[in-house]
Image: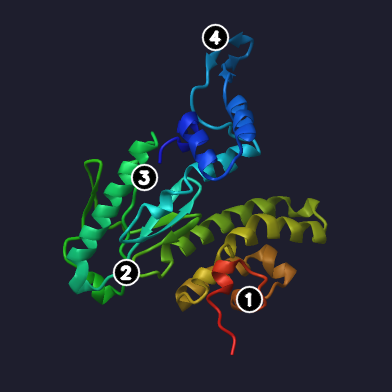
Amino acid sequence: MSKAFDSINHNILLAKLEDVGVSSRCLGWFKSYLSERYQAIRINSALSEKLPVVSGVPQGSILGPLLFSIFVNDLPSVAKNCSSESYVDDTKLLLSFGIDDSNIALTDLNEDLIRMRNWCFDNLLLLNPDKTKLMVYGSRQMLATLPDFRLSLLGKKLTPASSVKDLGVKFGPILSFDNHILSTVSSCKSTLCQINRAKHVFRKNVLITVINALVFSKLYYCSSLWSNTSCSNLSRLQGVHITLILKQLRWFPVKSHLYSRDALLAFKCMNDCAPAYLSSQFKTR
């Protein structure tokens, strides 16, 4: 969706608040909160004319994300053929199918895309076909035999992408995570070069904190997704560890870090310390 936070219709939002059980007194408060807002632009000492804000929720406010979540709360139920997942204003349609059923899958996906489009029209939100990606996952052998697989959204043809970025992780069709790791290694090495120039001004404990915050936070981001990647990718990651500055700090190898992070996540899942959608995947015997 395009500019979703700014496009929320106040009347539709108030109706949805009423649907979820907000009392009439609170509805009056929300109406007051959303109405009679004005915006202007200041450049140095020049101030533009004030204009009324006729749609949207205040961004940067505590209530803004909550009101947006309530507004799109019924969006996941729109899809009938696919499962769906949403994060803020990004929504994914998920469908599993075999090669022989690819035509049926195309029909099912197109039908749900039309339902999503109609929901956006009904709720006065804008779909962004330019930011909509189609990704087909499978083995190399399966993808090589996949027939022409195209979808259409608002007149734009969607063809399978070679890579998509979802919440900071780059996914490829065979889930090798090559692109993600190449990008991560490049970014981490660049950051380490900058830290290396200034390392003489840091005490050791401060240097460790800086590297954890600026390098390892990127290097091991969502590592449980890709920790079983190829040996060549692990070697690339290890290349970050053997840079001069990290050799001096004597950190454990990448493989040990990944193993400990996976073990910690598994422990949390088995002891109900992880989010429910992860813990529910573990069955203890």
Q: In which quarter of the image is the C terminus?
A: bottom right
Which quarter of the figure has residue 237?
A: bottom right
Q: Tell which of 189 and 20 is nearer to you.
A: 20
Q: Is label 4 or label 3 in front? A: 4
Q: Tell which of 230 and 8 is nearer to you.
A: 8
Q: Mark 2 points at which residue?
A: 96
Q: State which tag comes first along the sequence, 2 or 1.
A: 2
Instruction: Give coordinates of residue 70: x percent, y percent.
Output: 53, 44
Q: Which amino acid does label 2 sit on?
A: Ser
Which quarter of the figure has residue 62?
A: top right
Q: Which amino acid does label 3 sit on?
A: Lys
At mark 1, the secondary structure is loop
Q: Distance between the residues labelled 2 and 1?
A: 37 Å
Q: Tell which of 261 and 200 is nearer to you.
A: 261
Q: Residue 131 carries which label?
A: 3
Q: CB under 8 Å between callouts 2 and 3?
A: no
**Residue under the image location 32 percent in, 59 percent down:** 135
Q: State which tag comes first along the sequence, 4 or 2.
A: 4
Q: Name the residue under label 4.
A: 49
Q: Which amino acid does label 1 sit on?
A: Pro
Q: CB under 8 Å between callouts 4 and 1?
A: no
Q: State which tag comes first along the sequence, 1 or 3.
A: 3
Q: State which tag comes first along the sequence, 4 or 1.
A: 4
Q: Residue 45 carries which label?
A: none
At mark 3, the secondary structure is helix
**Residue under the image location 33 percent in, 67 percent down:** 137
Q: Distance between the residues labelled 2 and 3?
A: 22 Å
Q: Name the residue under label 1.
A: 253
In this image, 56 relative to 151: left or right? right
Q: Distance between the residues labelled 1 and 3?
A: 38 Å
Q: Is label 4 or label 2 in front? A: 2
